[in-house]
Amino acid sequence: MHEVSIIEDLFDRLDDLAREHGADRIESITLDVGEFCNVVPELLESAFVACRPFRARVTEATLIIRPVPLEVACDDCLSRYRPDGYRFTCAHCGSPRVRVVQGEEFLLRDVGLVCDMAEPEPAIQGDGALR
Amino acid sequence: MTNTKHVQVLENMLDANDYVANGLRAEWDARHILAVNLLSSPGSGKTTLLEAALPWLCPKDRILVFEGDIETERDAERIRSQGIDAFQITTGGTCHLEAHMIEQAWKLSDRQQPLDFIFIENVGNLVCPASFDLGEHVRVVMVSAPEGDDKPAKYPKAFRTADAFVITKSDMLPYTSFSVERAIREAKQIQPNLKVFVLSAQNGEGVQEWRDYLLEQRRLRFPEA
């Protein structure tokens, strides 16, 4: 689902975060990608690699994708399991009262930010004199 | 020398869309306007159903339709020819509507007019529209008889996120292999709470039941209206 436009939006958000934290660049980005969120991790990675060179703060960043498998819970028999396919009637008791516990999320989990600090001036100059 | 720090963000990547969608829904709640989002493949009969159902739903001046297409104003023109206000959103390439598009269109419309219903006819597509909340109260997914009864299984997210499943072009059932029973069974495995309608905009079969459902949804949502 529009992995390139998602990556572009992500880069905009990363710019905001870098400014908020006084950072110069992004070292790492961790995304949780649910099995049922309609985003394809491989395409997201390809889009990231393709777009990364064009945004100064992320040219050296690493994208870490955490796939989140679909898991559901039944409110009647209280079983919690990974469904076979996208079936949301309980595989154990047949109840329709099944809710998704995980696997729908598409989350920016965390970001590694880097501040490039200037080298401090030496206290002793090359001629040995203290300043 | 560098200084690295890790910041835990935990933000939904679709937060920006949801923020706008929730704002729209809150405004429509306050005005007692029921918003309906229609999803289907191209050619399932979304516009035709609106043409058949809307004129007898309530006074025409209490309905506003947002039409979503890549190009042309044809669908909005069809609705307007029924005497119902319609606003065309041409995306120029985006295959789905997003909340900010609806917000823009809503701001350009006469927002002071009293309305009972807003209908949003999404871009024809059973994939991407499923992921975007447009501020609607009711999401309707549609499949027509000629398309085949396997669409629920093939497009689970569209069905999982829907409130109602409308099987259109029921007049063509005798000429296709579409099994209503199979389509409903598989759709309900994905979303057990789906309300199902089988109708034909051509001959009117089942259309009144769908109108009644929309009126009931509005009554349930806004009992004081």
Image (cartoon, helix red, strand yellow):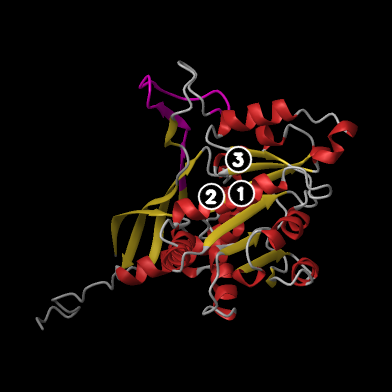
Could you say where residue B18 lies in the image, as x and y percent from the top left?
A: 46, 59
- Chain of the residue that carries numbered disc 2 in the rendered image: B
| Image quadrant where one finds the C terminus of chain A | bottom left
User: Relative to residue B143, is residue A70 depicted above or below?
Assistant: above
Segment tinted magenta in the rendering: A64-87
Residue linked to disc 1: B212
Q: Secondary structure at mark 3?
A: helix
Mark 3 or 2, closer to the camera: 2
Residue linked to disc 2: B216
Q: What amino acid type should be assigned to the residue bearing mark 1?
A: Asp
Label at residue B159: 3
Q: Secondary structure at mark 2?
A: helix
Could you say where residue A25 lies in the image, as x and y percent from the top left?
A: 40, 65
Q: What amino acid type should be assigned to the residue bearing mark 3?
A: Phe
Q: Marks 2 and 1: in contact by CB < 8 Å?
A: yes
Would residue B29 be found to the left or right of residue B166 on screen?
Answer: left
Q: Residues within 10 Å of mark 1 (few under 14, many from 20)?
A: few
Could you say where residue B208 lies in the image, as x and y percent from the top left?
A: 69, 48
Q: What amino acid type should be assigned to the residue bearing mark 2?
A: Glu
Toward the top, the furthest residue is A92
Could you say where residue B72 lies in the image, as x and y percent from the top left?
A: 79, 70
Q: Is residue A77 magenta?
A: yes
Tell me the residue at 71%/26% (across/down). Answer: B181
Label at residue A65: none
Toward the right, the furthest residue is B175
Q: Are marks 1 and 2 on the same chain?
A: yes
The alpha-carbon separation of the residues under discs 1 and 3 comes to: 21 Å
Q: Nearer the viewer, residue B62 or B137?
A: B62
Q: Secondary structure at mark 1?
A: helix
